[in-house]
Amino acid sequence: MKKKKVLRVFEGFAGYGGGHFALDRLKEKYPNFEFEIIGYSEIDKYACELYDLNHKDSKGKNIKNFGDITKLNPDDVPDFDIFMGGFPCQPFSTAGMQKGVDDPYGRGTLFQHIMRICEAKKPKYILLENVKGFFSKKFESTRKQMDNMLIKMGYSAGKKDEPLRVALLNSKDYGVPQNRERVWMFARLGGLPKDFSMIPEEVHNGLLMADFLDPKGYVPKEMYLSEKQIDHLKEKHNIDSFKVKKALCFDVYNKKIKNDGYSITITMPEHNSLRVIEPCKYKEIVRKMSVTEQFRLMGLEGLDAVGRKVDIVFGNQSYTQLSKRAGNGWDVNLVYILLDHIFNQLKELNEDWLD
């Protein structure tokens, strides 16, 4: 009897385990698909807590956290088939300082540690994510450095072959009404065919932000702005009225009510400029977005559950900490769709993980 293949996965900069959630969803679609998270790397204690609450190994135990990736010895890590990770975006983000490799906190060079680990372990695949700004002209030398490293490591079909296949994907084009643009990069040991695509077929289901909000009575009272706060918001941002016929998003940073029905990008609390406007005939209602709404817009399901809870265990973390996790995380729905798209193409290379 042929031994079933198991995709061995290492999650770098794991956060709440967006990659793990996506792989779980892939297994729901393909029951014969098997994967094992052999370990993850995360240093934020709140992210680690959330990861451990939601993900276990086949024996029901916590998955090993290898901690700080800059101190990780590849010899301590079991072999794996794919490295998945969204290395810190702040050095490349317009919401951050855009210092790149000169980031004062050292975050701009963390991709070099991904390369160091992958050079030693030689996984078959590498899947990386970052913000749109990473592919601006300002960071061209950083990308070139990454390409050269990958070519040297064998992740190309030849000197003229680009090792990383890249796509800019937006969550709102794949069924989740959040305007969240992210750059996705994929490499394969030995290279990829020239016609390999990183752009899955779009999913337009007609859902808007209003469809992802908590029902009345489930939003904590402290989320709501007072009349005085609403008046201040109107005066400061030159808004005539917050009376709307359907729930909309107010973009504080750009001083705009988003009439298209989509949410702006969910970010960390310190950069959060998102407010929800609720429809009401008699008064203006403006509030913060609840954590369940934020995680729902990060692609986690739960739309049909009582109280529309999301499929993630929060533990006892605060609103600020959970919002930070959501802002730093992966859109689970998009990752699931992208992995499905990638693995179906790998079948043509006789690398069939789904059957």
Image: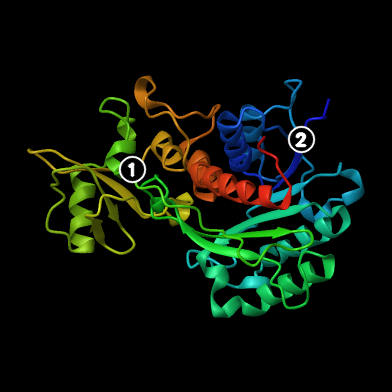
Q: Position of residue 253 (x, y in %)?
A: 34, 62
Image quarter where the C terminus lies is: top right
Q: Residue furthest left?
A: 282
Give the quadrant of residue 60: top right
Question: What residue sits 49% from the left and 28% below the top?
Answer: 311
Compute the Cα span from label 1 to label 2: 33 Å
- Residue 66 in view (yes/no): yes
- The circle on residue 205 is 1
Determine contact: label 1, label 2, CB under 8 Å: no
Q: Position of residue 183 (x, y in %)?
A: 55, 61
Q: Is residue 186 left or right of residue 262?
A: right
Going by the numbered disc 1, the residue's amino acid type is Asn
Residue receiving disc 2: 6
Query: Which is more N-terminal, label 2 or label 1?
Result: 2
Question: What residue sits 54% from the left and 32% below the top?
Answer: 317
Q: Is residue 237 left or right of residue 200?
A: left
Going by the numbered disc 2, the residue's amino acid type is Val
